[in-house]
Amino acid sequence: MKREHTKWVLALVLAGSIGVISTQAVAGVESKGAVVSKAMMGVRVPELAAKAAVLVKQADIGDREAIAVAVVEYVAKAYPAAVKSVISSIAKAEPSLAPKIAARAAELLPQDSVALASAAALGAKQFAPQVAASVAKANPKMAPEVTETVILAVPQEAVRTADAVAASVPSAKDSLPVIERSAMASGGTPIIIQRKKPIPPSQSLTGQDTPGYDYARP
């Protein structure tokens, strides 16, 4: 037992020095959340997004989702204003994780659901419908606003986004934006024609975004 603990400690030290969370570390005596907390501790706020992407990308494939969620949970608690940039960064590094981390972030910071969905969708455009659906399911009252925001961010996925949210949150179906193809849109790209019901503006809990972070940056 003592030898196993020593191996885990060594793995954690290496993870902290080179930004890698190994299988030994995440399988150690502490939870993934505790390991992520130690790896992220002391990282400057402007560097959180880049650090998050590195931790997720270099974790073993089977651990990436759990590590990504743990990172989001840590940042939401310690630096809520940086969550959107962290979500975007992870989504770009591992697009398939975008719906999961966006939904978890929306659970932790429900008033930021719209901005979080937009950041995740811009980071992983091919998963925009799933992002909108997962965030809307996490916060059904904001489903219409989430849907419209994601559609505006990724218009090429407009129809699939609206359909995905309607399937995920059936109770919101009647209040979702109406999507039609318009000759006004370039190449017939679907655009929003109208809302079915007015949506009150949301009030962000996190305030300002991480300074200088561009969510649409490739």
Image (tube, rainbow, N blue to C red):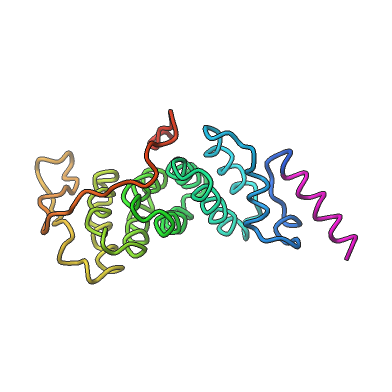
In the rendered image, residue 25 lying in the magenta stretch gets the answer: no
**x, y percentage for residue 105?**
44, 54
Residue at left offset 47%, top offset 55%: 101
**x, y percentage for residue 15?**
72, 45
Between 161 and 20, the residue placed more toward the observer is 20
User: On the rendered structure, is 94 left or right of 9?
Assistant: left
Q: Quadrant where the C terminus lies?
A: top left
28 up-or-down from 167: above or below: above
Residue 143: quadrant of the picture? bottom left
**x, y percentage for residue 123?**
41, 44
**x, y percentage for residue 157?**
28, 51
Magenta span of residues: 1-15
Residue at left offset 32%, top offset 56%: 132
User: On the rendered structure, is 188 left or right of 69?
Assistant: left
112 up-or-down from 32: above or below: above
Label the magenta part by its dominant secondary structure: helix
Q: Quadrant where the N terminus lies?
A: bottom right
44 up-or-down from 192: above or below: above
Residue at left offset 40%, top offset 32%: 214
User: On the rendered structure, is 149 left or right of 123?
Assistant: left
Between 123 and 29, the residue placed more toward the observer is 29
User: On the rendered structure, is 32 left or right of 201?
Assistant: right
